[in-house]
Amino acid sequence: MTARRHQPANTYPLYLIPGAVAFLAVIVYPFALNVYYSFTNWQGVGSPSWAGLANYRQLMKDSQFWQSFQHSLAMVVAMAVVPTVIGLVVAAALFDFVAKHFGSKLAAVLRACFYLPQVLPITVAGIVWSWILAPENGSLNELLKAVGLGGLRQDWLGDPHFALYSVMAVMVWVQLGFPVVIFMSGLQRVDPALHEAAELDGTSWWQRFWHVTLPQLRPEIYVVMLWCTIAALKVFGAVYVLTKGGPADATDVPSYFSFATFFEKTQVGYGSAIATVMTVLILALTVVGLSFQTRAEDAR
Amino acid sequence: MVLPLLIVLNNALKSPGDYSAHGPLALPHGIYLDGLKSFWTRVDFGRVLLNSTLISGSVALAGVLLSVLNAYAIGIGRIRGRAWILASFVLANVLPQEALVYPLYYLSKQLGLYDTRLSLVIVFSVIQSAFGTYLLSSVLGAFPREIIEAARIDGANSWQVLWRIVVPVSRSTLGVLMVFFFIWTWNEFLLPLVLLPSNDNQTVSVALGVLQGQRLMDATMTNAAGLLGALPAIAFFLVFQRTLTRGIAVGAVK
């Protein structure tokens, strides 16, 4: 007689049920509705009337929409490119200068200072910076006056020539901590023997940075660039509190544009089309970015 | 990096007269707390703090619970189609909230959940669990299988294995996730702005953002707002600094 082995039923799929139901209700169904709305004319009351591709056709001709996308590119520079570049230098400096000469404790404290803006609500950053950048009595203008550069005082957020750059500068401040933290933990992974060998060969700090640190950090650089670019394309809160897209649309971004179209102009169909185009771009970027990253990692 | 916050601290403690006489860069001539008090009462700050804490705390718990259940099926159960399921969670994680905001607004009105804190707890628990599932699935995928098999041979069913073995062993990762969910939810702006319009239900983030949008505050009160808004985040940051910096690196590079 053979002992019958007790085979428990596979119950694992059951654990997915709560998550799947919630996911369908909160993400999939609303997203499908959004896509549906984008093919309709709808003010949010009454029933939507089918409009086919009219919203998308109008979007293609809408200069405000294209302009908001140009500002998105500016945000990618401010939130992904600049923080990555500065973050690399800061992380390398903290890691092999500050930590070596002043102790790893100080390096950790400084890292925490860089990271702090990342945990502040964006509205706090907005309040702080719009007061610092204020035209009358703003700290930046007062500081310029105090050091004898009073002629450079500006209405930093209210002047269409400067507003976008001011918002970009604030975003660099907000964003910098993320790459610093990631790069510093990446540097801990790098074999110290590599650095020591380079040091013995008498290379300068910059040479080591270029030839040892940078190539070693390539996976982290991909990750940071990808996530920060996605975050830049979605930026909303900062624009809302700093400028509300103004002055004269100088800082408008797609997400603020869609928000205003939904809730101020109540053109729900048009707003949904903007949101759908944003989604397609972001998802495409993610898929391309992730496959690029996987390939790069496989090639190592 | 901390300089802007120090300037705010400096000016939150000044009287309006001191501020206008000496400007934002001078040190305060005496400590003045009325700015903080008047800001506190004006936005009913105690109430918005409570709202933020309740909402973020519930999301941290519910979001982690959903993530654990999903990740248990995917990482340990290795259920069929898991690659596709995981991919859809990743995509949901990068989906812009703008593409959900109007339908969520409309649906919450139809379901009678509009302007309730519950609506936000539900929405963010699901949104955060998209990231949590992604992260935890890979952590649980590497879970030592011998332990699970040993427990199964001893007659434990999958529910018991989950709660008696997997959850206790993964507790530190779950802790990191909870901290993240709490802070992220605390800082969210768009969906709370749309789903919680009334003063009674507003979160710290939204209360500050709306006030700033109206530009009704004088300089003293602006600084009081900046200081009081930053304090809970800074306190939380100091407590969980290590967890956060370690967790962010793990989460991003996974």
Image: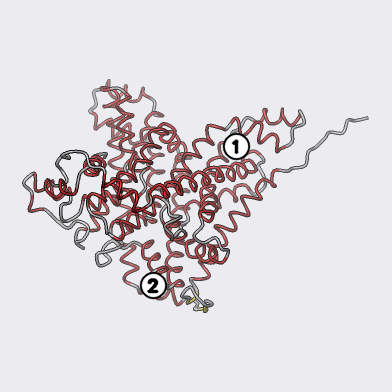
Looking at the picture, how far across and down is residue B199, in whole percent?
A: 41, 57
Q: Chain of mark 1?
A: B
Quadrant in which residue B240 is drawn: top left
- The correct choice, above or below, for A250 with respect to B34 in the image is below
Residue closest to the eye, A191 or B170: B170
| Residue at which label 1 appears | B141
Looking at the picture, how far across and down is residue B238, in whole percent?
A: 38, 33
Residue closest to the eye, B36 or A115: B36
| Residue at which label 2 appears | A265
Q: Chain of mark 2?
A: A
Residue at image coords 49%, 78%: A51
Residue at image coords 21%, 61%: A158
Quadrant in which residue A257 is drawn: bottom left
- Mark 1–mark 2 distance (CA, rounded to whole Å): 48 Å
Which residue is farthest top? A200
Under circle 1, the secondary element is: helix
Q: Is residue A262 left or right of residue A156?
A: right
Residue closest to the eye, A97 or A262: A262
Which residue is farthest left? A148
Viewer can see residue B91: no
Identify the mark at residue B111; answer none if there is no mark: none
Report the amino acid beneath label 2: Lys
Q: Is residue B66 left or right of residue A298?
A: right
Q: Is residue B187 left or right of residue A31?
A: left
Report the amino acid beneath label 1: Gly
Local crowd size for mark 2, using a 10 Å CA cut-off: few (<14), some (14–19), many (≥20): few
Local crowd size for mark 1, using a 10 Å CA cut-off: few (<14), some (14–19), many (≥20): some
